Amino acid sequence: MEKKKIKKKGKEAVITPPRPRFILREGMTLKEVAEKIGVKTRDLLSKLESHGKIVDLNDLIEETYIPILGKEFNCELELIPYEQEVKTRALNEKEKLITRPPVVTIMGHVDHGKTTLLDAIRHSRLVEKEFGGITQHIGAYRVSWQNRWITFIDTPGHEAFTQLRLRGAQATDIVVLVVAADDGVMPQTKEAISHARAAGVPIIVAINKIDKPEANPEKVKQQLAQEGLLVEEWGGETICVEISAKEKRNINELLEMILLLADIIELKANPEVEAQGIVLEAKLDPKKGPTGTVIVQHGILLPGQAFISGLTFGKVRAIFDDLGRPVRRVEPSMPVEVLGFNEVPVAGDFFQVVPNIETAERIVKGRLAKIKKEEAARPQILSLDELFKQIEKGEAKELALIIKADVQGSADVLKGLLPSFSTDEVKVKIVHAATGPVTESDILLASASKAVILAYNLRIPSAIQEIAQREKVEIRSYQVIYEIIDDIKKAVRGLLEPEIREIPLGKAEVRKIFDIAKVGKVAGCYVIDGKITRSAEVRVLRRNEVIYQGRIASLKHLKDNVNEVKKDMECGLALDKFQDFQEGDIIYAFQIEKRKPQ
């Protein structure tokens, strides 16, 4: 590369121009790569061969080739997924963008009328003769209102909504939050608000059951305001419609508001790129084979096209709409069932049309090979320690937290207090705060939001800890509020102590109580899960409430002192400074592990 010389105070200074930068798309052949970066194909092949890569012009570009080619041809190269390249191209061709129908997910608390509303919308838009055509459930359907289409996703609850986000997919344009007028804002309502906000999706509130005598819409609006959703008539920006799904009242008004909001947020699609979308549902049909419900986001999907979806691929054999009718052309925002996958796809994966089946197969083989290499070096759980290290490097600007507490007062105190520890460099953000046990939904939300879960005065079941481990989410348990405050301050300011983790060992049930001279009360126990070790710390649970936490004073099997008693074995157990056993008590054994920051 030519170097330019310039004079600076009598001396010559050499300025090297910046290296050219090229974006390469997954699935490109080496011939296409050579054309892209402007080098001769034989030079590109010889450079790779000099590094031990025996390749052909028709071979696909691989991640391992990128540093070699960048160094040899003095340029910066970046390899991006096929789907990302198509999406970027689709959005950059602004003159080709057209308005597309909105995709809506209905969320809310259990028994507040989500299913009734979906049925009311579906049936009010269908003529009687079509009812017999609803022969399958594909997880989404379309309705026509004022000569415009609206797509409704009718399967995702809060967990599924977040599962899509976990995989980088944004299937929903608008969330309709259903709140019962007689019940008000409930825990799952708050959870739905947190999930929608974390996804950056606008919310329309549907206050349902206004036909009931005890309905109080104004009280609901007040409760929503406390959650940060101020309705329009109160001077806010949240659209609110009072409905009765049971009596089909104001359903048309709700549909009209959905279209109005869709116009405001300007939903666009490019119909001229290779079709791409998102897999909503997937199953193995005994007659059709592997199938997936796909919502197209850009392009036009046609039968016969080759495609990739995550680690699966195939050729479109047939397409059916939500009424089970064959479809020859799928436009943006239209939900369809696609046949032709080589295996059952994963809900939330992107669906991308590619030039031919050979390219599809080679891309998926490359992805599988890359995953095998990455398995050995999987990232650690995102902990406060890890977040601090990212903050130190300037990589993290936000500390996202999910708060779960035993009582509302504690949750409110933490929700109000922790954000005040934000600094100019790092913002403390509360993604969700609620009472009750840590659930799978909390873990999925934490994973999608890159948040740490703070559990105050709660017991974390081993099943939940296993899910957290799998999803790479840290749950930190506390019994004292000032310890939470101390940890958050230290995390933000870079003074965090080693992480303390609770490792569950096992559970035993008290079956009989013995009063032994000079020893006191001993619990005759049966180990129902895992193991009980002599060195473990324990909690005594009575009707799911912790009544004691401490250490084991002695552990016996039959008449022998032992260090460990495993599942389905009996043991005698005495605790340090505790003798108030009752039959049916659960002894929960665990150990504390301290892990220093790396």
Image (cartoon, rainbow, N blue to C red):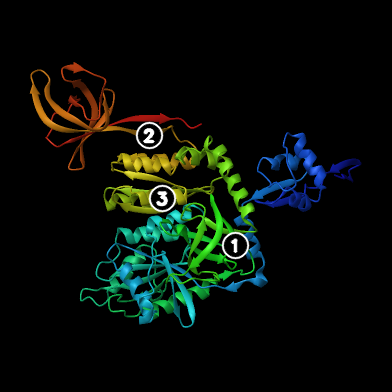
- The correct choice, above or below, for 31 with respect to 570 in the image is below
Q: Answer whether residue 476 is visible to the viewer in this image.
A: no
Can you tell which mark lies on residue 8? none
Asked if residue 336 lies left or right of residue 181, the reply is right
For the residues marked 1 and 2, what is the alpha-carbon distance in whole angstroms? 50 Å
Please report whichever mark, 3 or 2, sits nearer to the chain's N-terminal start: 3
Measured along the vertical axis of the image, is residue 144 above or below residue 578? below
State which tag comes first along the sequence, 1 or 3. Answer: 1
Q: Residue, x 55% and y 65% (percent of image)?
A: 297
Task: Please tell me how crowded label 2 is: few (under 14), some (14-19), or many (20+) other residues with Cα within 10 Å.
Answer: some
Q: Disc 3 and disc 2: Cα gap in Å?
A: 20 Å
* Left or right of 300, for residue 184: left
Q: Looking at the image, can residue 126 be seen?
A: yes
Viewport quadrant of the N terminus: top right
Q: Which mark is residue 501?
A: 2
Q: Is residue 399 left or right of residue 535?
A: right
At x 77%, y 34%, the residue is 50
Q: Which amino acid lies under the numbered mark 1 shown in the image of this protein? A: Gln
Between discs 1 and 2, the one toward the N terminus: 1
Q: Element at badge 2?
A: strand
Q: Give the percent coordinates (x, y) of residue 259.
A: 47, 76
Residue at the spot of label 1: 305
Q: Secondary structure at mark 3?
A: helix
Circle 2: residue type: Arg
At label 3, the amino acid type is Leu
Residue 444 disc label: 3
Q: Secondary structure at mark 1?
A: loop
Q: CA distance from mark 1 to mark 3?
A: 34 Å
- Camera-nearest label, 1 or 3: 1
In the image, residue 98 lies at what x, y percent? 60, 73
Q: Residue at x 48, y 32 (%)?
A: 597
